[in-house]
Image (tube, rainbow, N blue to C red):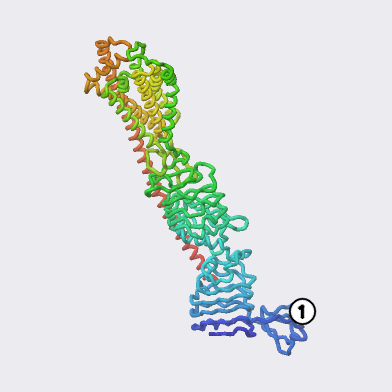
Amino acid sequence: KLHLDNNRLIGTIPDDVLSLVRLRELKLSHNRQETQCFEALTECGAQPYQGGVLCCGGDNGEQVCADGLGVEIVDPIYYCLTPGLHGTIPAGFTNTPYLQVLDLSSTLLKGNIPPEIGGLSRLEILDLSNSALTGSIPSSLGALTDAVVLVRGNDMIRGQNKNDRIAPLSLCSNVPGFDLVEDKTWCPPERNFLKAFYTDAKGQEWTNVTGWINEFNNHCEWHGVKCNEEDKVIKLMLGNGGLSGRISSKIVNLTSIENVDLHDNDLKGSIPSGIGKLVNLSSFIVSYNAITGTIPDGFDSLSNLQLLHLHGNRLRGTVPLLASKGGNYSSFISDCGSPSVFDSPLDCPSCTMCCNSQNECDMAEKKTDFGMWSSVFIGSAVFALLILAAPLVKEIFTSNQNVPATSNVASNEHYTIGKDSVYSFFLSTSVTAWIFAIAVLATQTLCFGFFIDEASLDFGDDRMWQYSFSCPPNNLNCRDNSDVTAFGWIFFALFGFFYLTGDMINGLKLVWSASKYGLSLKGFQIFLGGCCLFSITALGLYATVVYNVATSRSNVDMIFNTVILLFVNELDENLFASLHAIIPAWLENTTSEISANFDGDVRINVQYANANHQLRDDHAGRIKNVDKKLARRSNAIKTIEARHTKLKKYVADIRAKQAAENKEVKRVMAKLHEQRSKVEALESFREQQNR
């Protein structure tokens, strides 16, 4: 130990002190006295000062001596002396590896702080305060993580740039005992927060680290960081930058930040809690990472939030109800669609777009329960039928006598309801015929109900709804991938008109004509048959529309889906044809009975049989033509699907090749960065050797 503090030492520190290899404590502080001025000729000798040691007589008769920096020539008449240690701090502290205390405070020492002091791993106290040191604080002092480092009071110390007052980043972030660590000028706190973010996100693997964790750079000059006039971080834009690791919790201390964009990286961990502290946050984009956990509280208090992209991660739970509504359908996006990587997707009541595990997305406003709306639709249809049945109701309440069952009112209800449809069985008195008619009605209702239910968009349930949007990593806006054009809807309208309009009009005609028979069995049969024909046709039309809305993403899809659903609508005619093939005698008797009661002419036996055979042949021909058309369309669809599969494979090959090329580019860039670092290290070593 060498304690020479609080003495009147003058001169410089001899280099021989550093030859004390076992030295643990070196204290030379407070070897600096008050400045005294003397008359040059009477108190300091007759000769002018030429350098070296100058001694002048003191007030108490003792001499005051100083040299070098301690001598100030005010004018040729007066000399002002400030005795004390001066000069520079000697180099060579590598020879004192056991040094624990180095106290050189309150002296006249000047010059730079020797960088090798940072290599004293056992150092506990480094006190260089209240001296005349200049230059910049060496970054090597950042290695003194367990030491107390005091440099305050050296007013000539600057940053690496002469006009800056900024300490090395490592010293501010790694040495809690640094006396300027709380000084926001020397140690900007947001610079430390960004360094923590860099460390947690494995900054050494980033594709662009320009400026990051440079010891003396202003953090506002780092790549992806933008500050306001007060050097407060307002933007952190590091999308597609090769980030990994996790998002540092220190990000919530960037209280002025407005935009955070970390999309398309490989960040893991969870979203830091305390996001609600960032009251100025307007966009938080972390899509396409590997973030897990739940959404922290606080998003609901961010009234300025306009963009929130959470999709492409593995988040669970519920996104809090957001305070703002968003500007468009790409404002608030999360993995709230199905299928999900979890049993149930993320719940996001404020999201404008929901994506699933297949990176398919759709607008949240499309969420619709078509089953509920089908009830409204059918209810409206029934209401319309009741209005049409008003004459029948009037007949019931105003007539005292029913129309006889054998009335000869001319009518063609059998033809209107369809002679080749099992719905004509509602006009029969046979229980078996009614069972067939009700069975077909129930089957069609169930089929259409299945299609309607599957067409409903419920983001929490995996149904047949085809998501039509994609939200790619390289774009903040989602795009609509649907290829359905006006031509597709025109063809759909034509199919619907040709196949469904006739049945709907005939159903309405039957309901209207039921009043002719008053309150009678015939009136009831016609009314019920008309209601069933109109309702099932209307339900088929509704199912076709909603199913196309839900699943058709091209004109071919729309035509294909329409044909399938129209086939369901023709089950009544197909069953009639099947019954003709299985039990022709029973069918002929049943139709003869219906014709006798509703065709207005009972003389139909031979003529009707011939007509029926002709109808059967015509119907068989129609079925054959339809089968041929369906076969041609099926072949066309298969051809399109094969081309589509081939195109998808070609695109996948291109993407794979591009990914390989990107990987090779990143590897070459990393190698180039490594070579550049080595060159810089060699140049730095050469400069030190030259010095």
Which of these two is toward me, 549 or 192? 549
10 Å neighbourhood of mark 1: few (<14), some, or many (≥20)?
few
**Image position, residue 39 (x, y; %):** 77, 83
Residue type, label 1: Pro
Q: Is residue 159 visible?
A: no
**Image position, residue 654 (x, y; %):** 38, 43
Which of these two is toward me, 2 or 421? 421
Which of these two is toward me, 380 or 514? 514
Does residue 30 sit above or below 449 in this rendering? below
Which of these two is toward me, 360 or 377? 377
Location of the C terminus (image quadrant): bottom right
Quadrant in the picture for residue 462: top left
Q: Is residue 532 left or right of residue 350?
A: left
Q: Say which residue appears at 36% left-offset and 11% top-offset.
A: 410
Q: Is residue 417 visible?
A: yes
Outermost residue toward the front in this view: 400
Residue at disc 1, secondary structure: loop
**Image position, residue 353 (x, y; %):** 47, 43
